[in-house]
Image (cartoon, rainbow, N blue to C red):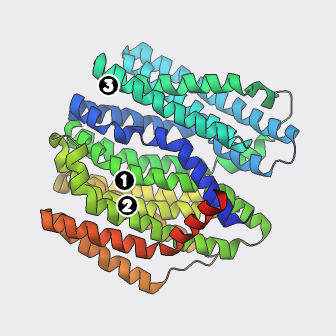
């Protein structure tokens, strides 16, 4: 299969499987903002951010290692060995985290500690299960798994928050119950024990050598996200943290769409490298990706005054001005993720950690310095600048592996359109909003016309 077609197909399947799960938090925003105060929503977001930070330590990112090595596995014995190693290492990490949380609970007697532990364990199970299903080639079950989880999550959120009025606990328990129940059902249905054999001597050293350097990368991204919340929470208060959390939901939506691509990109980049045709393939995908991501940025910025008024409660409206800044930050972080796919294809994961560590330091430093002067906008600006830094740092590093370029005419056009749409966004009257939306739609189509044609051709080929 031509690698471009494989990438499109896998991205589509992953999108189908993840849409319900990944977009749940976005479509539930009207419920959250109507029934939760800004302080309550800020508290939930704070807990989720801390969990995201802790998960890589608990798993040693064996889900990433398991998926990457399953791609190269030649027989069932190798697959069982890889999966068994990942489960054993992850199980040991969960046991350690459980002991730590247990001790904290004994001293504090706060139930939120136990809820945090359950939320974190369910996150680990979901991450490992998703990598397992894709790694063994069960994309059908992967899609169904995420789809059912998303639907169940919506039902539980509505029941626990709107009906039983459980607030913060309801939102967290909805996620925990949805993830664990679907994972258990899927494990029983596909007889997951057939893929596990703890008696096989696995290659722990090689898999850990791949995953451990990625931990600094993962936690640095968490620090970049978490430092914003920590500084806002402690300097400005939970109310401002809630505003920022809602504003971040829209860039997160963009990041979700990119995530569909990135999961398949890691596989396609490894296959292209093995086949010896990676340079031309990487260059083509690089240009298409910039065009696509930029289109999302300008479209979301242009339509944001309309979307925000429809979806978000008026108490949160002040956060709208952070959205464009965070969208551009996400644009650069997604492009740096593309370079990360090149590094992982070469199994050179050390670069990922060193680049994101520096980015996290810059983000935290800017947050501390600017927060009192600029408020929540300091957090957004710090995220943008740190994302630009990691993009250029990785861009320099990737030159030793592949030569990538972007047309200057397109770059100039992107800059001009960005300035126009941002200017109209700040005006926010009806003529400005309409003009901005029209410009964004037309330019997005023109910029992505080749990719649109390629996707249409692929669709016709399949159907």
Query: How many residues crowd mark 3 within 10 Å: few (<14), some (14–19), many (20+)?
Result: many
- Structural distance between the alpha carbons of marks 2 and 1: 8 Å
Contact (Cβ within 8 Å) of mark 2 with mark 1: yes
Labels 3 and 2: the sequence-earlier one: 3
Labels 2 and 1: the sequence-earlier one: 1
Q: Residue at x 59, y 30 (%)?
A: 125
Looking at the rendering, which quadrant does residue 398 occupy?
bottom right
Q: At which x and y percent is residue 419?
A: 26, 75
Q: Give 272 or 379, whichever is nearer the viewer.
A: 272
Q: What label does residue 455 carry, if any?
A: none
Q: Residue at x 36, y 74 (%)?
A: 443
Q: At which x and y percent is residue 141?
A: 65, 36
Contact (Cβ within 8 Å) of mark 1 with mark 3: no
Q: What label does residue 251 carry, if any?
A: 1
Q: At which x and y percent is residue 98?
A: 54, 22
Q: Quarter holding the C terminus?
A: bottom right
Q: Residue at x 37, y 56 (%)?
A: 363
As helix, strand or loop, the secondary structure at mark 3 comes to helix
Q: Does residue 195 appear in the picture of this structure?
A: yes
Q: Quarter holding the N terminus?
A: bottom right
Q: Residue at x 71, y 50 (%)?
A: 68
| Relative height, residue 247 to residue 315 (above, below) | below
- Structural distance between the alpha carbons of marks 1 and 3: 23 Å
As helix, strand or loop, the secondary structure at mark 2 comes to helix
Q: Nearer the viewer, mark 2 or mark 1?
A: 1
Labels 1 and 3: the sequence-earlier one: 3
Kindly identify which residue carries mark 2.
329
Q: What label does residue 168 carry, if any?
A: 3
Q: Give 204 or 462, whichever is nearer the viewer.
A: 462
């Amino acid at each position: 299969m031509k690698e471009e077609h494989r990438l499109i197909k896998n991205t589509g399947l992953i999108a189908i499987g993840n849409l319900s799960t990944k977009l749940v938090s976005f479509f539930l925003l009207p419920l959250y903002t109507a029934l939760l105060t800004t302080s309550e929503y800020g508290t939930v977001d704070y807990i989720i951010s801390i969990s995201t930070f802790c998960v890589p330590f608990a798993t040693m990112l064996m889900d990433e290692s398991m998926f990457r090595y399953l791609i190269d596995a030649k027989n069932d014995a190798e697959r069982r060995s890889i999966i068994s190693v990942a489960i054993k290492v992850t199980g040991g990490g969960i046991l350690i985290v459980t002991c730590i949380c247990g001790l904290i609970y004994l001293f504090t007697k706060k139930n939120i500690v136990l809820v945090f532990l359950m939320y974190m364990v369910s996150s680990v199970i979901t991450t490992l299960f998703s990598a397992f299903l894709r790694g063994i080639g069960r994309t059908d079950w992967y899609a169904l798994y995420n789809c059912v989880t998303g639907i169940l999550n919506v039902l539980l959120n509505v029941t626990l928050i709107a009906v039983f009025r459980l607030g913060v606990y309801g939102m967290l328990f909805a996620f925990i119950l949805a993830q664990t129940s679907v994972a258990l059902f899927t494990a029983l249905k596909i007889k997951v024990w057939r893929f596990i054999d703890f008696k096989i001597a696995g290659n722990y050293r090689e898999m850990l050598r791949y995953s451990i350097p990625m931990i600094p990368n993962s936690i640095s991204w968490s620090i970049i996200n978490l430092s914003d919340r920590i500084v806002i929470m402690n300097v400005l208060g939970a109310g401002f943290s809630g505003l920022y959390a809602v504003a971040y939901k829209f860039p997160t939506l963009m990041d979700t769409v990119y995530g569909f691509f990135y999961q398949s990109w890691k596989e396609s980049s490894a296959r292209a490298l093995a086949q010896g045709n990676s340079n031309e393939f990487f260059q083509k995908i690089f240009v298409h990706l910039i065009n696509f991501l930029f289109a999302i940025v300008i479209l979301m910025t242009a339509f944001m005054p309309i979307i925000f008024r429809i979806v978000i409660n008026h108490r949160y409206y002040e956060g709208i001005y952070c959205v464009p800044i965070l969208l551009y930050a996400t644009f650069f972080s997604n492009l740096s993720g593309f370079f990360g796919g090149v590094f992982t294809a070469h199994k050179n994961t050390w670069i990922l950690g060193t680049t994101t560590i520096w980015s996290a330091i810059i983000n935290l430093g800017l947050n501390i310095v600017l927060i009192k002067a600029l408020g929540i906008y300091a957090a957004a600006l710090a995220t943008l600048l740190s994302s630009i830094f990691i993009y250029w740092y990785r861009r320099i590093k990737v030159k030793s592996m592949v030569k990538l370029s972007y047309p200057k005419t397109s770059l100039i056009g992107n800059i001009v359109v960005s300035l126009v749409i941002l200017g109209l966004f700040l005006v926010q009257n009806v003529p400005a909003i309409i003009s901005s939306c029209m410009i964004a739609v037309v330019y997005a189509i023109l910029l992505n016309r080749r990719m649109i044609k390629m996707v249409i051709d692929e669709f016709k080929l399949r159907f």
